[in-house]
Image (cartoon, rainbow, N blue to C red):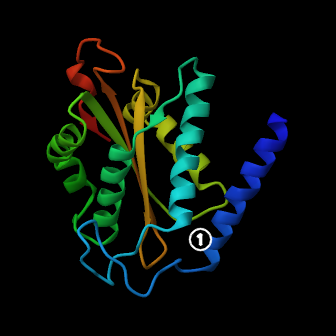
Amino acid sequence: MRDKLKLVTGLAVVAVALFFTLAPRLAMADHGDDYGHTNNNSPPISILDEVLEKHVINVVNDYRKENGLPPLVEDEGLTKIARKTTKQIAQGSYGNIVQVHGLWAARFQEITKENPYIYEAAENHAHMWPDVDLAGQIVQKWAQGQRQNRNLLYRWNITGCGVTMDVEGDVYVLQIYARGKQYDPKAIDPKRMASY
C-alpha cells in the first residue's frame, strides 16, 4: 500500500512539474491580495503552488524521519507568511537574497504576531527552475548546505511553506520552521534565529 502511495505521489509530482514546464502559469484574469486589492503583476497562489508546498513539507518530513526525527506539522499562519514572502521575491520587492535574509527580523516579528506562542524560528530559501522532482531537488540542495541542513534537522515541530513562480518561470520556495511553547517548552537557542 505504501509503495502505491509513493507511486501516486511521484506521478502527481511529475504531472505538476510537466505543467510548470509546459504552461507559464495557472493564472486568473484578475486577482487580489490579502486585503482585496487587485494587482495583475503578481501571480496568484495556484493549486499547483499548494501541491508543491505540501510536497516540499512531505519530502522534508521524509528526510527528518530518515534521521530519526518527528515530522513537522504545517501551520497555516507560517504558510501564509511564507507565501507572502515568495510573492514579494518573485515580484522583485527584494533586490537580492541578501535583502531577504536582512529582513528576517521583521519576518520573525510577523511570525510571533501571527502566533504569539512561537519563540524560536528559522527559514530556508530556494530559487530554482521547474524540474520533474523539484521538491526532492530543493531538499537535497538544503541538505548539502551546513546551515540549511541544521534547519532541516533541528527540533522544530511546526512549519509553513510558500511557493511562487514568477512570469519567467523561476520558482521561489521559502520554508519557515518554528517551535512554540504549546508544543515544546524547552529553552531558546539564539543560534537558531536565522535565515538561510
Q: Quadrant of the N terminus?
A: top right
Where 63 falls versus 164 (above or below)?
Answer: above
Instruction: From the top left corner, tell me how far across and down residue 140 is, in percent.
Output: 56, 41
Q: Tell me the residue that label 1 is attached to.
A: 20
Image x and y of residue 168, in percent: 45, 78
Q: State which quadrant residue 3 falls in.
A: top right
Q: Is residue 180 left or right of residue 20?
A: left
Identified at 80% across, 47% down, the residue is 7
Density class for disc 1 (Cα within 10 Å; few <14, some 14-19, many ≥20) is many
Q: Residue at x 20, y 37 (%)?
A: 112
Q: Is 188 situated left or right of 50 in this image?
A: left
In the visual, does 142 lie left or right of 77? right
Depth check, front residue: 33 or 90: 33
Image quadrant assignment for residue 146: top left
Residue farthest to the bottom, as pictured: 29
| Viewer-proximal residue among 98 and 181 | 181
Q: With respect to residue 103, does 127 lie above or below?
A: below
- Residue lying at the far top of the rendered structure: 186
* Horizontal and vertical percent position of residue 179: 33, 26
Q: Label 1 is placed on what type of residue? A: Phe
Q: Secondary structure at mark 1?
A: helix
User: Image point 43% across, 79% down: which residue?
Assistant: 167
Q: Quadrant of the C terminus?
A: top left
Q: Which residue appears at 65% of the width and 54% of the height?
A: 133
Quarter-wise, where is residue 84 in the image?
bottom left
